[in-house]
Structures are given as C-alpha cells and as structure tokens.
Image: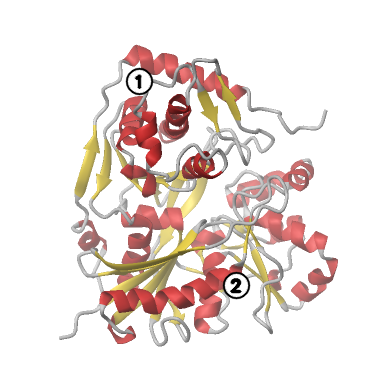
Amino acid sequence: MTERYVVAIDQGTTSTRCIVFDRRGRLVSLAQQEHKQYYPKPGWVEHDAAEIWRNVERLAPEALRRAGITEEQVAAVGIANQRETTLLWDRDTGAPLGHAIVWQDTRTDDLVRDLRDRPDAKLVEHDSALPLATYFSGPRVRWMLDLHPELRARAERGEVLFGTMETWLIWKLTGGLHVTDVTNASRTMLLDVHTLDWSPTALAFFGIPRAMLPEVRPSVGVFGKAVAAFPGVRIGAALGDQQAALFGQTCFTPGEAKCTYGTGSFLLLNTGGELVRSTHGLLSTVAYQIAGGPTAYALEGSIAITGSLVQWFRDQLELIASAPEIETLARTVADNGGCYIVPAFSGLYAPYWRSEARGVIVGLTSYITKGHLARAVLEATAWQTREVVDAMNADSGLDLTTLRVDGGMTADNLLMQFIADVLDVPVVRPLAAETVSLGAAYAAGLAVGYWPDLEGLRQNWHRAAQWLPTMDPRLRTTEYRNWQRAVERTFDWTRPS
C-alpha cells in the first residue's frame, strides 16, 4: 500500500512554510520562503497577501518534490497562520484591497482610545472575552472602512470581503470558499465566544457589515478540497498558530501549558470546556474545536516582541550577522552588567496592555559592551515570560510545574536555561521542534481519520531536551525587581501631553 502523509501550511509573520509529516509526526520535508515586511510609518506593519499566496503556490510542489511524493499521497492539508493580521479583498477579482495590516501594527491606537470611552464597550469585551486593544482585527477593519468610505457600501453588499490569513489562503486554495475557524475568529473581537458566531453587538459597535465576514467553522473538520497548490487534496483544519502549537504539543488536558518562542512569544494554558476570564491581564480564547465535539478554551499570555528583538539587534543595530550569534556574544559576559532592554516596540501586551508604551534601554554605563546588550536582549524574553506565568498562576489558581517550549528561539540554550532560572521550573523541549506546523498537520489528519484520536497523537510526543533551574533565589528576586522597574519606564511614552 502506498504510504500517505499530511501537509501543513504554516503562514507565519516573517515567512511561509509547507511541511510534510508522516504518521509518527516526523518531519519528512520542508520548503520555506520569507516575505517582505513593510513599515510605511512608525508603528505600522504590513504584508502583501498576494506575495504570500504566490509563495504558497511555489512552496507546495517543492515540499512534495523534496519528500518524493505526489498530491495523491497527501491525506489532508492543515493551515496554521499568524493571527489577527487583517485583509480586505474584492470578491469578484480576488485581489487584495491594499496590504494586510499585521498583528503587531498599532495604527488603530487613537481609534481604540476613542472606542473605549463608549458605554457599550464593556458589552463587546464581555462577548469577545478580549480587552479593547490595537492587537485585534475588529478595530483594523473599522479603520480601513473609515479610511475608504466607498468600501463600506460595497462591503454591505458582500462585494468586499474580510479575512485573517487562513481565510485568505482557504479562499485561494479552494477558488472562493469564504470561511474561518473558531480560533482565528475568536481573535477579531467580533465573535461571541459563547455562541461561537459573530456578535451583533460587536458588529454594530465597530460598524462592520456582516456580509463581509466569513462563515465560522470548527478548527478540525474538512473545509473543502483544494483546486490550487494541492489540487484535489482535502483541507482538514485551520488554527491560529498558537492554538496549533498547543495542539502540536498535545496539551489536550486542562492545566497543560506551552510557550512558543518566535517573532513574539505566546504562552497558552488549556482550561478545558470552561472559559476562564482573566483578572490579571491575560486573554481568554478558544483553544480548538473538533467538528461534532465540545469547544476547548485557553488562557493566553501574548508577548509582542521576543524573536523580533533579536532580528532588530541583527538588522538595525548590526551587532551580529545572524540570529544564532547572539548566544555566542551573550556568553562573552557573566551577566547583563546592570543593563535591561524592554522591547515595547508595539506597546506592551500581556499582562499590561499598554499600547502607548515604547521600548527602553536602562542601566547604561560606560562599562556596558555589546555582550551585555546581547545578554539583555535574551533576558528580556525570559522576564516577559515570568510576568505572564505569574499572571497565569494567579488566574488559574494553579502553579506551573513544567513549561513545554517550542519555536526557533528554543535552539538558544542560554536563553532556555535563563527561562528555567527565572521561572524556577523545568523547561522541556519536545523532539518535534516544529510544533505549530505539527499541530496543523495533527488537526488535519484527525479530521480525515489519518490519526484515530487524541491519544494516538499523544504517543508521538517525546522529550528532546530539558533545562532545570539553578539560579540563587535571592538573585532571582533582585533581578525581577530591576526588570519591573525598567518596565515602568516604558509607560505613557506616546500619550499626548
């Protein structure tokens, strides 16, 4: 019998990848292509969705060629995507109406500030279980419709469509199916997370026509068949990238948590069928829904800038030539020399939600070298993780005992050790490093019977590395206090005087 495989399309913030997995969850082949980042104004971040689709069209056959297989051997395709990135396109031509506005973008700051003052804002926050912030898609759609009033009438007629990146890719893959999944829909501020349908209250609040919105479906279930890139192959799943990583880490039981370290970093805790409302600055979100089954929810701590801080250190400051070099440079010194970098480039996300904050470097003296700066860059990721874990412990009433990690930054052993030190718990990395892509593949395979059940997926999880805490508790306390003092200095930077 011919062996079959599952393919994941991992559409991330900086690149798109197509990865082929086998039944044991092992990576068979990978094809990857970066896309251009556009920064037209301070705080604005954009992508060209047409470029991203062209990359998918090129990567799909390349991934299959490298695996030595054909479309007939692909049981299903799953999609994981950068969340909250917002796109409008023309239903008739299929052409994007401008660039996609990326999740990091803060252009809606003034709009969000005005919307917060409305008396019905609390109703929207209750229905969506999200704080009114620039992070989410709803304010961006409103901003685009306000900027181009002619689009609103067309949107009311369904001629202009809205979607996040998985919606765009499914539209292109299927030749016109306009759908989203519950995880991505739950990040728009437009979804009622209890009914899992678009909220009339939120649509009226933002002034967004329902006719432009996609149909909401479960994360795990057949969406349709592809006519492009993977012609004839079923699309079995779509999940926001962080929910996909939770799925790939097989965190199916309430209380299990993972943190993905990429462009940003995202810690998710499975809370099961209960929507836990955070009182400590976290997000309550949909973890996944399997077609025909109940919804699983999660608490999430979103950190905007972690891996992208290393990219900034490389590309803007030019202190290293490649991202892995930062560990070597940081090891040239024993500590940070009293220097702390708080990367509030797009404001601060969890647990603060301060969109007016901007990044700072504090503690500079003539003693500081680029080695100290490199160490401060890495330590910023660890301390931001600590802040989120503290909030998650407070919200859940549980103390995190182990953190499962994944993402490109987990290759940095110094960083992983420092995270274990500041959390004072073991940090564990699985054998399968590509857990975002693997989660999308798992979900798609589950939808078509390629894998029988969740327990079968658990059996594929194996530990590859572990870091145990070694830091003196007194030093941990002192350094954390210094970090918090540095964070306070980022507040109110862009607020009008």
Q: Nearer the viewer, residue 57 or 203?
A: 57
Q: Residue at x 33, y 15 (%)?
A: 473
Marks 2,1: beta carbons within 8 A: no
How many numbered marks, from 0 up? Answer: 2
* Badge 2: residue crowd in 10 Å (few <14, some 14–19, many ≥20): some
Q: Which of the two discs, 2 and 1, labels the residue nearer the N terminus? A: 2
Q: Residue at x 38, y 40 (%)?
A: 325
Picture quadrant of residue 28: bottom left
Q: Which residue is mark 1?
A: 334
Residue 192, horizontal then vertical, whole percent: 59, 57
Judged left or right of residue 170, residue 353 is right
Q: Nearer the viewer, residue 163 or 44?
A: 44
Q: Nearer the viewer, residue 28 or 289?
A: 28
Q: Which residue is mark 2?
A: 50
Tag nearer the camera, 2 or 1: 1
Q: Nearer the viewer, residue 57 or 224?
A: 57
How are the colours assigned in the image?
secondary structure
Judged left or right of residue 3, residue 227 is right
Is residue 348 at all visible to an observer of this figure? yes
